[in-house]
């Protein structure tokens, strides 16, 4: 499970750095994008299970 988190957040980090490498924005904005992806992923995986229970 820890390995899946590591892989997921590594992919998020690379995805948020691609626009920096293309010159679209700076590292501060890339960090904000990474944090947004991480928080949204955490909320969806954490609370999505509560609302997706089968009856």
Image: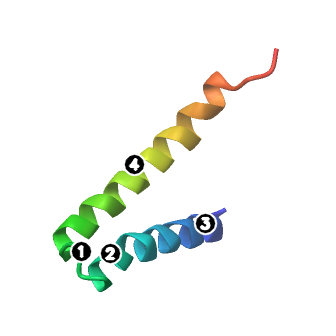
Q: Secondary structure at mark 4?
A: helix
Q: Secondary structure at mark 2?
A: helix
Mark 2, mark 4: which one is toward the viewer? Answer: 2
Q: CA distance from mark 3 to mark 1?
A: 32 Å
Q: CA distance from mark 2 to mark 1?
A: 5 Å
Label 2 crowding class (10 Å Cα cut-off): few <14, some 14-19, many 20+? Answer: some
The residue at which mark 1 appears reads as 24
Q: CA distance from mark 3 to mark 2?
A: 27 Å
Q: Secondary structure at mark 1?
A: loop
Q: Nearer the viewer, residue 54 or 30?
A: 30
The residue at which mark 4 appears reads as 39
Q: Earlier in the sequence, mark 3 or mark 1?
A: 3
Q: Earlier in the sequence, mark 4 or mark 3?
A: 3
Identify the image quadrant of the N terminus.
bottom right
- The reply to whether callout 2 and callout 1 are in contact (CB within 8 Å) is yes
50 shown above or below 55? below
Q: Earlier in the sequence, mark 4 or mark 1?
A: 1
The residue at which mark 3 appears reads as 2
16 shown above or below 50? below
Mark 3, mark 2: which one is toward the viewer? Answer: 2
* 10 relative to 28 in the view: left or right: right
* 5 relative to 28 in the view: left or right: right
Label 4 crowding class (10 Å Cα cut-off): few <14, some 14-19, many 20+? Answer: few
The residue at which mark 2 appears reads as 19
- Give the residue at x 27% y 79%: 20
Type of colouring:
rainbow
- The reply to whether callout 4 and callout 1 are in contact (CB within 8 Å) is no
Q: Secondary structure at mark 3?
A: helix
Q: Nearer the viewer, residue 35 or 19?
A: 19
Q: Quadrant of residue 32?
A: bottom left
Residue 55, position as x, y percentages in the image: 82, 14
């Amino acid at each position: 499970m820890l390995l899946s988190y590591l892989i997921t957040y590594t992919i998020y980090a690379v995805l948020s750095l691609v626009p920096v490498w293309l010159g679209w924005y700076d590292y501060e904005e890339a960090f904000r994008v990474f944090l947004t992806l991480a928080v949204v992923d955490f909320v969806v995986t954490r609370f999505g299970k509560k609302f997706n229970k089968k009856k």
